[in-house]
Image (cartoon, rainbow, N blue to C red):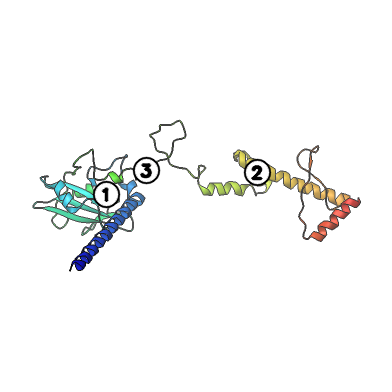
Amino acid sequence: MPAELAELVGGSSSGEEERAREKSQKRRNTLRWFKETQARKVVRDGAFPCWFHGIITRRQAEDLLANKPVGCFLIRVGQSREGYTLSYRGENRCRHYMIEMQSNGKYVIMGEDRAHASLPDLVDHHTRTGIKPLMELLTTPCGQMCDLETDYEEFKGLHHPSVPNHGGSDPGEDHAIDLYPRGGPDQIHLEFQKLFQPPEQSQGLESQKPPVLRRISDRKQRVESGEAGWGSRARRDGIGGGEEVVGDRDHKKPFPRLYPSIRLAMREIQQIQQV
């Protein structure tokens, strides 16, 4: 008998641990969902709306709405799903409606026909148009129990990633990381594409290039002009190798040449040594 009791206690304990892990995982998923898809839509001017509440239970919502006037409302983040729930004080009791998120990003109260671009738009609409089927209006937003300790503390800071301040601006100001400061990846692609345009097409754009790209273009043109000069001298002198003049004639630099095989390379070296 004691062994069976211990087994039952152990099984109950493991089941509670499993449920606790599942609950914790759902909470993490909800936080990630809010950060990635909702934060920019809900937060206005760096602050949450007064009717917004975090992951609170149905009972907690009803406690907040107790002794409030009819139509007092709040919107809370869902506990077991990615979404919201509208809770408000009705004539006789509190009512709770799920807010569905459509694939196009709009919000609609389950049972309603009209969708809204944002939660504030949904709230504003139902302060003028009653919610089906009882056609009750939303009136007064229900705030926090304590403004110093809100129930959405874990959602704070999710709406804007902070970036270290390396300049002379205000340290408290948030900055976005600009990975493509000159107009995005397409602009960078176009800049490099200009390097391979014929000279007559790129002369008019030369002054618009940044210094780094201009130096690359100048180096490419010097190499091309050097190859042309080397080819004419090779034909005149009757040899296949030599030294290439790049830029100043007083400074000669060996210009490497590629050969299709080692045998041809050795043959040309022997010809140079015999001259």
- Gap in Å between the C-alphas at discs 2 and 1? 52 Å
Mark closer to the observer (2, 3)? 3
**Image coords of residue 82 (percent x, y):** 29, 56
Q: How many marks?
A: 3
Q: Secondary structure at mark 1?
A: helix
Q: Residue at x 64, y 41 (%)?
A: 214
Q: Earlier in the sequence, mark 2 or mark 1?
A: 1
The residue where tag 2 is placed is: 216
The residue where tag 1 is placed is: 119
Give the class, few, some or many, for how many residues have Cα within 10 Å of label 2's Cα (few <14, many ≥20). few
Q: Residue at x 82, y 59 (%)?
A: 264
Q: Residue at x 75, y 45 (%)?
A: 225
Q: Report the amino acid beneath label 1.
A: Leu
Mark closer to the observer (1, 3)? 3
Quarter containing the N terminus: bottom left
Residue 101 visible in the snapshot: no
The residue where tag 3 is placed is: 160
